[in-house]
Amino acid sequence: MQAQVLSATVNRVEIVRTINYGQRYIIDLKCAYKGQVCVSVLNMKSSDSSFELRKGPIYFFSTYGSCLCFHVYGNVVFWNATKRSLGTNYSQWHTLDELSTGYTPKGMAACKSGAVLVCLWNQQVHNRSLGKVLKLSQNGRKQFEISTDKNRPIFICPTYIAENGNGDICVSDVNAVIVTDAGGFLRFRYTGAQSDPQFDPYGICCDSKNNIIVADMVKNRIHVINQNGELLHYIQYKDMHKPRALCIDEDDNMYVGEWLSEEIKVLSLQ
């Protein structure tokens, strides 16, 4: 199913507060405890690949330049490129080598069940670019894989992922948001408004109403679509520039990480 809309209104939202994280190139952002976030950035000034647990607004900080997620059981799960493993804080590691031969992890999300969703990309370009999504149990075992619909590839390069409140799996891919049900069966593709010549989705999250919220970094706006793929409106705020990473907390406060900013913007969607 292809979800299409003609146009939508723009909701201009005020910035409630900002959080400084000291790096300009944010890769991923996930909400942890109330008022705290996990941040992953690309450190372009050095080869530093450190990570640390902090106190205060930033609960977990990584300069791996990799995606991460905050687990429902209180752990931060992230991709450790050096160990080629999924790391849980410092102590627990699960290798993906047997499950991801020829692929590299991209986005990750924690499910309410305790499982973890991982986007994988085959590191090829143009017509050879393919991706898939794995659902892993807490011990790293594969529960199922999403890669095709009616024997046709679903993904080109899945980059960000979120589980919706209704169980749907929402993925930012090349020029489309792809949504499957909880079992991995394709529900729809959202490709933006018909008036948009280009749609480049990045960070993705879902609010308490099961709306899907996705950052459009090139167009400097955020799309809000409902659980059936219909565009409700756009979100913009003052001086918005290259919104890339998104997360949302239990109070529907949305955290926005911009690609060339050292601050996380916090918006209230209530």
Image (spheres, grey):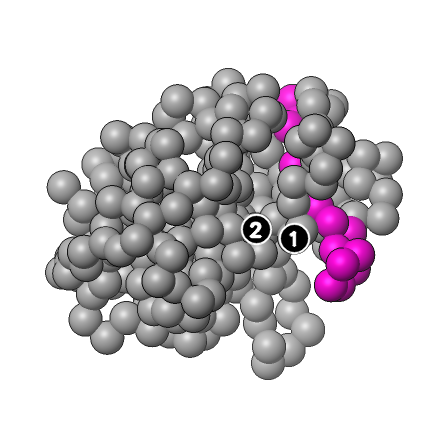
In 3D space, how far apart are the residues under numbered discs 2 and 1 (Cα atoms)? 6 Å
In the picture shown, does residue 152 fall above or below 159?
A: above
* Residue 134, image quadrant: top right
Residues at discs 2 and 1 in contact (Cβ within 8 Å): yes
Q: Residue visible at 66% across and 27% down?
A: 136
Count residues near mark 2 (Cα–Cα under 10 Å), then give few for <14, some for 14-19, many for 20+: many
Kindly identify the amino acid type of the residue bearing the numbered disc 1: Cys
57 vs 129, nearest the viewer: 129
136 vs 2, nearest the viewer: 2
Kindly identify the amino acid type of the residue bearing the numbered disc 2: Asp
Q: Which residue is label 2 attached to? A: 173
Tell me residue 76's x, y (percent): 53, 40
204 vs 113, nearest the viewer: 204
Q: Which residue is label 1 attached to? A: 157
242 vs 6, nearest the viewer: 6
Looking at the image, can residue 24 be seen?
A: yes
Quadrant the C terminus occupies = top left
Instruction: Tell me how many marks there are.
Output: 2
Q: Is residue 125 magenta?
A: yes
Tell me residue 174's x, y (percent): 58, 56
Q: Residue furthest bottom?
A: 45
Residue 222: give its label. none
Q: Residue visible at 73% across and 63% down?
A: 126
Q: Secondary structure at mark 1?
A: loop
Q: Residue visible at 86% across and 43% down?
A: 101
Task: Please indicate whether residue 6 sits to the left or right of residue 69 in the image.
Answer: left
In this picture, which residue range is highlighted in magenta? 122-139
Q: Is residue 142 magenta?
A: no
Looking at the image, can residue 89 be seen?
A: no
